Amino acid sequence: MNGSAPLVAAFLAVLVCTLVLRLLNLRHLRTHGAHVPAELDGVIEPERLERIARYTVAHTQLDILQLVLDGVVLGIFLFGGVLGHFDAWVAAHTTSFVGGGLLFFGLLFVTESVLRVPFSLVEHFHVEKRFGFNRMSTRLWLADLGKSLAISLVFVGILVGGALLLVRWSPDWWWLYVWGFFLVCSVFLLYLSPTLIEPLFFKFQPLAVPGLEDAIRDLLGRAGLVAQRVFQVDASRRSTHSNAYFTGIGRVKRIVLFDTLVEQLQPPEILAVLAHEAGHWKMKHVLRRIVVTEAVALLALFAAARLIGSERLPGLAGLEAASFYARALLLIFVGTLLAFPITPLASALSRRHEWQADRFAVALTGESRALAAALAKLARENLQNLHPHPLYARFYASHPPVVERIRELRAKET
């Protein structure tokens, strides 16, 4: 246990910090949550604000419960001797290096997925249903769960199996080949998702609003972008939450609007939202994030190749010996702990991109009122927390607080 003490301490420190940030956010909401921001006066009434507060509290409480239980299970597995017994069990049931890895990581993935089922049930059929969002039947929820698990298992199997084959094939340079393999799989998924995966969950249809598709294509043309197809999907079968996104790459790139978004926003507001998304593509935010992610992944795999054979590594979990798979799992765990302190940096970069995309949308559409109105409506309809704690927002928020975005946009009206 002595060898594992530093890792246990780091794990507990990250868990405590995560919980404290959520509790700070709740406390801030209790203090300021009854005040309607001036930017949303006339859009969000006090009754709606009270509902937003209750929705935020319900989701945060469920999140805290899941964090605590996940922490307990993970702590017992890594530091309570379960990892060693599981590692030995896998070794006793297969002599194949690749087969052992598939069994090791496959069982862990299935176990984690099963443990998350109760939380998903509570989220959809208690929290989301209580606030009028969930429209899924139990049958549809089960169908989505089964399809998601099957797709994920196939993808995890391909990644794990391919990576282990490369490790066996090139013991010295596997880190580079595995990085390249993962990169190819990621690009392939960008091509595969719009045409084969997403249609398993949504029905893609032409836009229901006459003239909207032509307006969208004209907007993208002015931005120097082209989307092969523009669709709306039947998201309302599952939830009343609304969204819009660009998906795919190259010839399969398309724009997807939730039918709930089409119902909630006026055409100029929809165009403003898509102008914002176009800004991300035009300014290559997506490409930049991919480059940064792949650079970090390459560095992490290089470090893993140097550390995975260390005699001290099993001792981090209180073990005397460990397989390649158990060692890889420990390195992944250490990596998640090391990534925690840099979370605010990643969030800050994401928020910077959002500000840039907002400014691009204003320049492209020639006005800021439509985007401000769209953000206000989406905040209202999705019960978005209008009073996040500043520290929580700086740490986790990928988007600037909606009140700040609307304030900035309205300042451009004058």
Image (cartoon, rainbow, N blue to C red):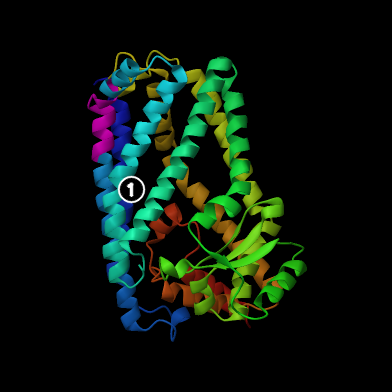
Extent of the magenta region: 72-84
Q: Which residue type does callout 1 highlight?
A: Thr
- Give the quadrant of the C terminus: bottom right
Q: Quadrant of residue 290?
A: top right
Dot 1 surroundings within 10 Å: few (below 14), some, or many (20 or more)?
some
Q: Quadrant of residue 96?
A: top left
Q: Is residue 57 visible?
A: no
Give residue 247's position: percent from left, percent from top: 60, 56
Q: Is residue 332 visible?
A: yes
Q: What residue appears at the point 53 percent right and 51 percent down from the top-left corner? A: 197
Give residue 278's position: percent from left, percent from top: 66, 63
Horizontal placement of 236 versus 135: left or right? right
From this view, report whether residue 151 is shown above or below residue 296: below
Q: Is residue 410 magenta?
A: no
Give residue 232's position: percent from left, percent from top: 57, 68
Q: What residue appears at the point 30 percent right and 13 percent down from the top-left corner? A: 320
- Give the quadrant of the N terminus: top left
From this view, report whether residue 67 is shown above or below residue 233: above
Give residue 140's position: percent from left, percent from top: 37, 60
Badge 1 element: helix
Q: What residue appears at the point 60 percent right and 79 percent down from the top-left corner? A: 209
User: Which residue is denoted by mark 1 in the rendering?
Assistant: 18
